[in-house]
Amino acid sequence: MSLSNPADTAPDYIRNLPRYVPGKPASEVKREQAKPVRLHRMASNENPLGVSAKALAAMQAVMADAANYPDPSGHQLKARLSAQLRVEAQQLVLGNGSSELLDLAARCFLRTGDEAVYSQYAFQAYPVAIHAVGATPVCVPARDYGHDLDAMRAAITERTRLVFIANPNNPTGTLLDAAALQRFVTSVPRHVLVVLDEAYGEFLPDVDALHSCDWIAEHPHLLVLRTFSKAYGLAGVRVGYGVAHPAVADLLNRLRLTFNTSAMAQAAAEAAFDDADFLQRSRSNNAQGMVQLEQGLESLGLPFIRSHANFIAIDVSSTGRSGAEVAQQLLAAGVIIRPLGANQLPQHIRVTVGQPDDNEAFLGALKQVLS
Ligand SMILES: *Cc1c(COP(=O)(O)O)cnc(C)c1O
């Protein structure tokens, strides 16, 4: 056998990894447009209010120090998180976005032959993280577009080492009942890590209803992941955190790259975490925008999946076109959204809640598609 380059020698489970299909960059859309129209970025669940002024100032304040390595332990940010979340600093791990942490969990706890359970229509990064270490993904059919906890529990075997749950889920926006989720975590054997991904938790009407960090004391097999990318408006800066039993956090901290969060990311996250006013405005813009989108969709007669996050998945099959075709048509009107074909939902599109004028533009363009 003659191998032409090292790519041919990588394990099959690496060579078969799917490529991530990003939402179209606004710059590219602009370039392709015959006559320029205003762009509405509603494809990537980014914060439509932009970045908090306090986070921006905090980043500017540390930029002059860019020649120096950041604090590898993220001491100050961890102290702030630990006080607020009522957990020990040793229970925390910082990540280059929380997506780094879910990959780290897979690298830490899975080996070839192990199984990891996740749900159909859950976040696409889960099967990638599982495949990347040569473990076996076990995808459990969804119920009403959300996690079927009973079926997921039944899918756990003696080979299972990890379970991924997104709550609220991306891309469907479904939310699990807190009591049912806690029962599920209790029912999972203690040697199986449950990764509870709460990237959209801050958008829930009652944020304090998220008690998952409190469960860790009794459930040492729980890893809660949160991010600054969504409600805190820092997707471009790359910072998230995990909360776990100190022994689990210790392993993750040893495996992660020493300087995985930059000085700017740490400073921005700390300032954003303290900017209660920005968070409140993000939450209320989202709540109002969600009502605006739901009412608009109802009057257009398009079914959607009730969402608890900052986006909504819409069934466009009544248009007689696929999600990809509808996305293409919306693009011509300057509205960038995401078709969900890659998530096995070819008849759905996902749109991020924008500011009122973005939502208006989206609904207007969608009406054009229907006519
Ligand atoms: C956006 C998102 C994340 C985290 O994104 P980062 O930018 O890496 O923090 C994690 N899980 C889900 C389900 C998401 O949608």
Image (tube, grey):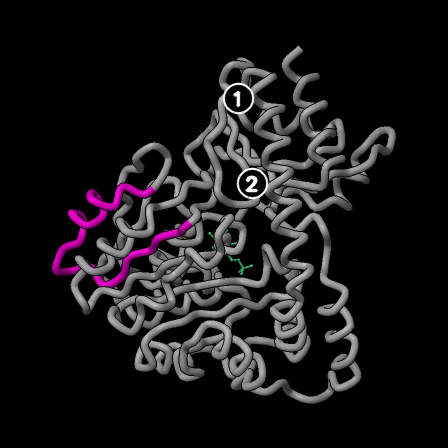
From the viewer's perspective, is residue 15 above or below residue 365?
below
- The image quarter containing residue 135 is bottom left
- Residue at (40% x, 50% y) in the render: 167
Secondary element at tag 2: strand
- Residue 63 image offset from top left, x and y in percent: 77, 79
Horizontal side of 222 relative to 75 (left or right) equals left
Residue carrying label 2: 311
Horizontal side of 261 relative to 185 (left or right) equals right
From the viewer's perspective, is residue 244 above or below residue 316?
below
Task: Give the quadrant of the N terminus.
Answer: bottom left
Task: Say if residue 354 shows up in the picture.
Answer: yes
| Three-letter residue code for mark 1 | Val
* Residue extending farthest top: 371
From the viewer's perspective, is residue 309 above or below residue 236?
above
Q: Which mark is residue 254?
A: none
Q: Nearer the viewer, residue 22 or 349?
A: 349
- Residue 211 image offset from top left, x and y in percent: 38, 61
Residue range highlighted in magenta: 147-167
Horizontal side of 343 relative to 332 (left or right) equals left
Task: Say if residue 1 shows up in the picture.
Answer: no
